[in-house]
Image (cartoon, rainbow, N blue to C red):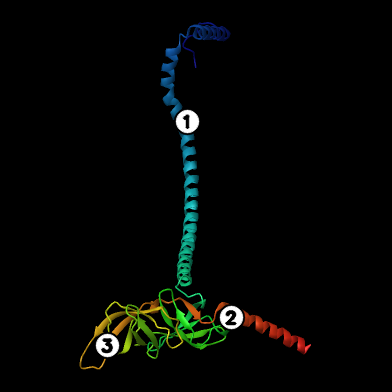
């Protein structure tokens, strides 16, 4: 290809000329700042070219970062979901334990007299017979349970121990049709007998004369008679009174204060003080030692 300008200075001279011009421009710019505005204009013109030149690299960097970030977010989200399920299960268990602790605290804070010992038991079985209101607890003869022992929950009287096994016992509830409990009206002290009706939410008062001072809403508590239940524990609340003069007695219905259909933990009362029990255990251990010594 033939050059357009055939005549001119040679290449070395051109290089020297360019170097001289560059040096002169550098000196002028350094001393007098003559090219500051020109540089700004040139920078503005070159900026779009720089963005365009850097666009492919920035696109690749953004894509790789977002791809890695998305994968990381998905992984972290999955881990958080797994932990959330685990924590929810733990929270549920904690709520169950908290509810159980609340029930136990209510049991232990029941108005129990100091001369009686108390023992907490848990229901492990419920009688499937709808006409027999009995439950099985996880306490037996090894724990000191005995027949006729009074059984309560944190609200009121529940029943009494019917049969005792080695490590479990059967409790008959106050709503069982074969059960009766001596009570008194907490308002005026009138004594009566409350019997089970076979219904989980109803007791009936036997042989109540029409002239007896009893009202709806009266609270019935244990009278202490019969040597089964200690005195003063809530049993039931009077809900209805039917006075038919053609009948010899009034029909009085009550509702148990204890939630019979929601029982989980029970409180067993013993008339024997803790000190007497410890004394008997000590005497028994001494007897065992004496017997062992005699055998030797």
Q: Is residue 271 above or below residue 54?
A: below
Q: Residue at x 32, y 87 (%)?
A: 205
Note whether 86 is above or below 191 in the view shown. above
Quarter assignment of residue 194: bottom left
Q: Which mark is residue 64?
A: none
For disc 2, the marked residue is 276
The residue positioned 76% from the left and 86% from the top of the image is: 293
Measure the alpha-carbon separation of dots 1 and 2.
94 Å
Q: Nearer the viewer, mark 1 or mark 3?
A: 3
Q: Nearer the viewer, mark 1 or mark 2?
A: 2
> Can residue 267 be seen from the camera position used here?
yes
**Residue of label 1:** 54
- Kindly state the secondary structure of the residue where label 2 is placed: helix
Q: Specify whether 138 is left or right of 256.
A: right
- Outermost front residue: 188
- Quarter in which the C terminus is drawn: bottom right
User: x, y percentage for residue 175?
Assistant: 38, 85
Which residue has dot 3 on it? 251
Going from N to C along the chain, the mark reached first, 3 or 2, is 3
Q: Position of residue 295 (x, y in %)?
A: 77, 89
Labels 1 and 3: the sequence-earlier one? 1
Q: CA distance from mark 1 to mark 3?
A: 97 Å
Query: In screen coordinates, is 176 left or right of 101?
Result: left
Q: CA distance from mark 3 to mark 2?
A: 44 Å
Q: Alpha-carbon neighbours of circle 3 within 10 Å: few (<14), some, or many (≥20)?
A: some
Q: How many marks?
A: 3
- Label 1 SS: helix
Left/right of residue 108 with respect to residue 294 in the rendered view: left
Asked which secondary structure carries label 3, the reply is strand
State the residue at coordinates (46%, 29%): 53
Nearer-the-camera pick, 127 or 198 = 198
């Amino acid at each position: 290809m033939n050059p357009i300008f055939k005549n001119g200075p040679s290449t070395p001279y051109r290089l020297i000329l360019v170097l001289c011009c560059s040096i002169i421009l550098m000196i002028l710019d350094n001393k007098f700042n003559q090219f500051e505005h020109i540089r700004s204009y040139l920078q503005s013109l070159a900026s779009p070219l720089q963005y365009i030149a850097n666009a492919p690299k920035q696109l690749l960097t953004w894509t790789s970062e977002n791809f890695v970030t998305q994968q990381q977010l998905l992984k972290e989200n999955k881990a958080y979901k797994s932990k959330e399920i685990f924590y929810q299960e733990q929270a549920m268990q904690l709520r169950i334990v908290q509810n159980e602790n609340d029930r136990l605290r209510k049991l232990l804070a029941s108005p129990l007299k100091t001369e009686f010992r108390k023992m907490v038991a848990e229901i492990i079985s419920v009688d499937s017979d709808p006409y027999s209101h009995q439950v099985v607890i996880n306490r037996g003869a090894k724990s000191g349970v005995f027949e006729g022992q009074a059984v309560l929950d944190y609200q009121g009287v529940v029943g009494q121990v019917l049969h005792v096994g080695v490590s479990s016992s059967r409790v008959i509830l106050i709503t069982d049709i074969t059960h009766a409990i001596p009570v008194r009206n907490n308002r005026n002290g009138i004594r009566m007998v409350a019997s089970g009706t076979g219904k989980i939410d109803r007791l009936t008062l036997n042989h109540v004369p029409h002239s007896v001072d009893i009202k709806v809403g009266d609270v019935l508590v244990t009278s202490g008679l019969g040597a089964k239940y200690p005195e003063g524990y809530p049993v039931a609340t009077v809900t209805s009174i039917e006075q038919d003069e053609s009948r010899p007695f009034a029909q009085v219905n009550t509702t148990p204060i204890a939630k019979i259909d929601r029982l989980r933990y029970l409180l067993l009362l013993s008339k024997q003080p803790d000190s007497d029990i410890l004394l008997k255990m000590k005497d028994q251990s001494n007897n065992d030692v004496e017997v062992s010594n005699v055998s030797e």
